[in-house]
Image (cartoon, rainbow, N blue to C red):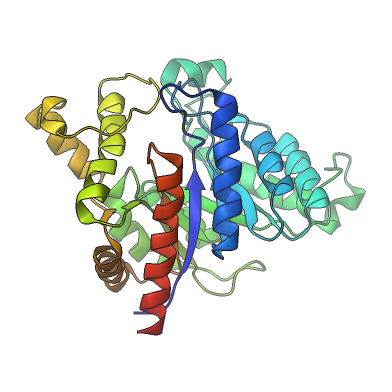
Amino acid sequence: MKNFEISVLDLAPVKQGKSIHDTFQDSLSLANHTEQLHYKRFWLAEHHNMESIASSATTVLIGFIANGTKTIRVGSGGIMLPNHSSLIIAEQFGTLESLFPGRIDLGLGRAPGTDGLTAQALGRNPAIINKQFPRQILELQTYFSKDNADALVRAIPGEGLDIPLYILGSSTDSAWLAAELGLPYAFAGHFAPEQMEMAFKIYREHFQPSEQLAQPYLMACINGVAAETSEEAHRMSTTLFQAFINIIRNDRKPFAPPVDDMDDLWSPMEKSMVLQKLKYTLIGNQAEIEEQLKDFQEKFNVDELIINSHIYDHQKRLRSYEIFREAANSLSKA
């Protein structure tokens, strides 16, 4: 089992009884906390039309987090590129990189980050997404290139800046693309675990070196809930379970506090669906988290683990990331 980096995925979760301003302050607090714990990066994900998630203006929020931190890398996990023009994203991330040199990541996905009606309001054309997404990535690389200086359309700021690109995915399609382009690959195991193993296999076997990357770099995003005791961690995880029930029911209300018994809330079918989607969710005390991390890494051998943590109590969320850091450190010394 090789050593691995650990990072943070934050969706700017909105909690019942809290304002969106509170949400953003909690995100900054989490970024400061994980920076002190030496997490590698802090990513924010683009979503739209959800009462429970406030990271819709992802680039703006990245700037807020980067301005409030000093060393941790900050970026998108990801920008849903077909929602935008390539030039606008190049300019926005060029601006961020110019403000916070050497700290900005640009993770890219093709999903809408929302429902079909909202995707239509964003101006997406589903008939051309699969062709448009790879083309847009190449456009971004062109805009960031020094060689684009003589072009009629240029990204200012952006041109000539070293802004690393990452391909995000929840299926094998993105694995083929990341391998072909020679870019790092991050899989959304926190909500779509079914194809993760096959996607990693495809990426490793078909990877082609590029200017950005000489060998494959694999990142897996998973859910994590850690606490002092196993009982407390499992109770805290019911906030995450309720969030996934809401997705199944198309109910986008803010995140709920934990409950004592999930069987009062979900049907047997809903329970089965939720647990399938949360297959790679790590829950427990530090010893249990260490064992689960070890099992996961022995199976997937990733370069980096990105932890998404839906915990209602902010202080307990901070403590959860401390426990994950301690567990990862313990494994690296083993």
Looking at this view, name the residue that lies furthest to the left: 268
Q: Is residue 145 above or below residue 271?
A: below
Please give the name of the residue rendered at 57% of the width and 71% of the height, measured from the top-left corner: 209
Q: Is residue 213 visible to the viewer in this orientation of the structure?
A: yes
Residue found farthest to the bottom: 334
Is 73 placed above or below 30 here? below
Say which residue appears at 54% left-offset and 63% top-offset. Answer: 37
Q: Residue at image x 69%, y 34%?
A: 60
Query: The N terminus lies in which quarter of the figure?
Result: bottom left
Quarter where residue 204 is shown: bottom left
How many numbered markers are drawn?
0
Is 162 positioned to the left or the right of 6 in the image? right
**Residue 50 in the image, given as x and y percentages of width and height:** 45, 22
Image quadrant in which you'd find residue 55: top right
- 245 vs 308, left or right, is left
Q: Where is residue 188 in the image (x, y as percent from the top left)?
A: 39, 48
Q: In which quarter of the image is the C terminus?
A: bottom left
Find residue 266 and report its image quarter.
Answer: top left
Percent position of residue 81, x then y: 59, 37
Residue at the location (39% across, 61% down)? 323
Q: In the image as oriented, which residue stretches furthest toward the right?
A: 150
In percent of width and height, residue 187 lies at 41, 53
User: Where is 221 relative to 331, above or below?
Assistant: above
Q: In this view, does 212 lie to the left or right of 11?
A: right
Q: Can residue 106 be seen in this view?
A: no
In this rendering, would 253 be left or right of 82?
left
Of 226 and 221, nearer the camera is 226
Q: Which of 152 and 182 is in front in this view?
A: 182
